[in-house]
Image (tube, rainbow, N blue to C red):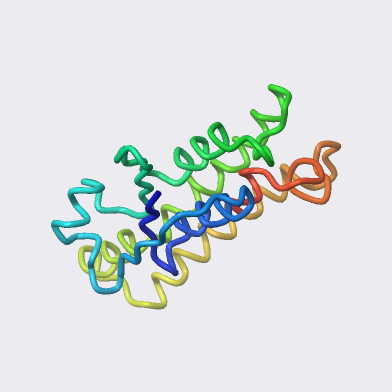
């Protein structure tokens, strides 16, 4: 199994956490985002989206998008589980995870930062204000879903880490 990753990629970090929690070995293949290695033909053949992470399993199948990879790992390596056993718990955990991974994180990625800089010509201070705004919005909403809720334990849901904690 090959895991295409970069040390500063939040999405890659999510998968690294899942791999480590489950004790799944993977060969790490470093893709330097700062050097635009994700745009090179070699990586584009692996993931046409040119985004990290990607996981190539032993039969050559390429998995992409961190939450899809984590779902695969959870189904293939069930211990420890990253989703609660009950349907309501799974829905809550997925909702918490999606708040961070799909609403907060995409707005601060290098691809968005480049667009803000090159296309909209926003100064660093304006970009920092943009990132701060969306990060605070996401974390405040997340806190609202966690604070004082019976299902919240030592972790986002219960007393063991789930995909919500991985995304957070």
Above or below for 82 versus 30? above
- Residue 75 location (% of width, % of height): 55, 31
In this rendering, position of residue 101 left or right of residue 109: right
Where residue 94 appears, x then y in whole percent? Answer: 60, 35
Q: Work out which quarter of the rendered image holds the C terminus and state it.
A: bottom right
Residue at the location (36% across, 57% down)? 4
- Observer-nearest residue: 95 or 9? 9
Q: Quadrant of residue 112?
A: bottom left
- Most extreme residue toward the bottom, as rendered? 124
Q: Left of 29 or right of it: where is 46?
A: left
Residue at image position (31%, 65%) is 31
Residue 131: x and y in percent read 47, 64
Residue that lies at the very extreme toward the left in this rendered image: 41
In the displayed image of the protein, which residue is found farthest to the top?
A: 87
Res 74 quadrant in image: top right
Where is residue 34? Give x, y as percent.
30, 73
**Residue at image point 50% right, 59% down:** 13
Going 38% across and 42% down the picture, which residue do you hit? Answer: 57
Q: Nearer the viewer, residue 6 or 3?
A: 3
Task: State left or right for residue 166 relative to residue 14.
Answer: right
């Amino acid at each position: 199994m090959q895991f295409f990753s970069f040390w500063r990629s939040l999405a890659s970090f999510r998968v690294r956490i899942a791999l480590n929690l489950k004790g799944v070995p993977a060969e790490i293949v470093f893709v330097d985002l700062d050097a635009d290695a994700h745009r090179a033909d070699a990586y584009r053949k692996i993931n046409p989206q040119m985004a990290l992470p990607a996981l190539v399993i032993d039969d050559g199948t390429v998995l992409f998008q961190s939450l899809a990879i984590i779902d695969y790992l959870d189904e293939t390596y069930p211990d420890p589980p990253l989703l609660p056993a009950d349907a309501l718990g799974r829905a809550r955990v997925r909702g918490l995870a999606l708040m961070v991974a799909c609403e907060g994180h995409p707005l601060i990625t290098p691809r968005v930062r480049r667009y803000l800089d090159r296309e909209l010509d926003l100064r660093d201070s304006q970009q920092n204000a943009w990132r701060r705004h969306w990060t605070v919005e996401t974390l405040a909403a997340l806190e609202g879903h966690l604070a004082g809720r019976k299902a919240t334990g030592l972790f986002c849901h219960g007393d063991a880490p789930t995909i919500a904690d991985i995304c957070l």
